Amino acid sequence: MKKKGDKGTPAISTASLPDIIFMLLFFFMVSTTMKEQELKVKYTLPDATELHKLEKKSLVSYIHFGIPIESLREKFGTAPRIQLNDTYRTTQDILEFIASERDKLSEGERPAMTVSLKADGNIMMGPITDVKQELRRASALKISYAGVRIEGYGM
């Protein structure tokens, strides 16, 4: 019993294609993180020969230290400033900043928290030492100094 007729391949249904595209779009929207802070200081990172990449960026809190950006210099001057999250702060605010950053982490992740200090290479060491002393008072002893790899040195 053979059926007569032209047997071709059936057309592929594209009815579920918009659903698949919507699911992919939704997945990437949920899993993508946006830039968390706006940089308000300008700095040139110092040269370094020994660099290590930070593995888990969610455990890193950043302290930016440099001169205000061009648009804010008229208001804040040209003296070096400390930026914690999106605002200029003083060294006395570091203790509160570290406490709030620790509260964002789970109990098991808190010992692995690292503070990354991104400071201009031309700033005097005195203010940086003040920042380090405040970090010591806050028991934030894992400090990473950001730098730029010198050409010719491997990682």
Image (cartoon, helix red, strand yellow):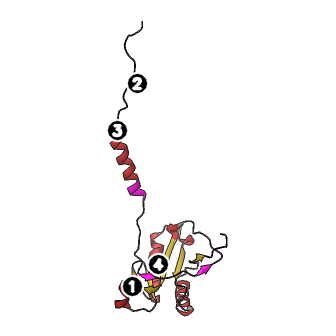
Badge 1: few (under 14), some or many (20 or more) residues near its Cα, within 10 Å? few
- The alpha-carbon separation of the residues under discs 3 and 2 comes to 19 Å
What residue is at 42 percent from the left and 63 percent from the top?
33
**Residues marked 4 and 3 touching at CB (< 8 Å):** no
Q: Which mark is residue 16?
A: 3
Question: In the shown orientation, is residue 88 left or right of residue 132?
Answer: left
What residue is at 55 percent from the left and 92 percent from the top?
124
Residue that numbered label 1 is attached to: 70
- The alpha-carbon separation of the residues under discs 1 and 2 comes to 65 Å
What residue is at 54 percent from the left and 66 percent from the top?
56
Residue that numbered label 4 is attached to: 99
Query: Foreground mark, 1 or 3?
Result: 1
Q: Which residues are magenta?
A: 28-52
Q: Amino acid at mark 2?
A: Thr
**Residues marked 1 and 3 touching at CB (< 8 Å):** no
Residue 43 higher or lower than 8, as above or below = below
Q: Amino acid at mark 1?
A: Glu
The earlier-in-sequence mark between 1 and 3 is 3
Dot 3: element: loop
Residue that numbered label 2 is attached to: 9
Badge 3: few (under 14), some or many (20 or more) residues near its Cα, within 10 Å? few
Query: Foreground mark, 4 or 2?
Result: 2
Residue 58 higher or lower than 28, as above or below = below
Quadrant showing the N terminus: top left
User: Would residue 6 be visible to someone looking at this image?
Assistant: yes
Dot 1: element: helix
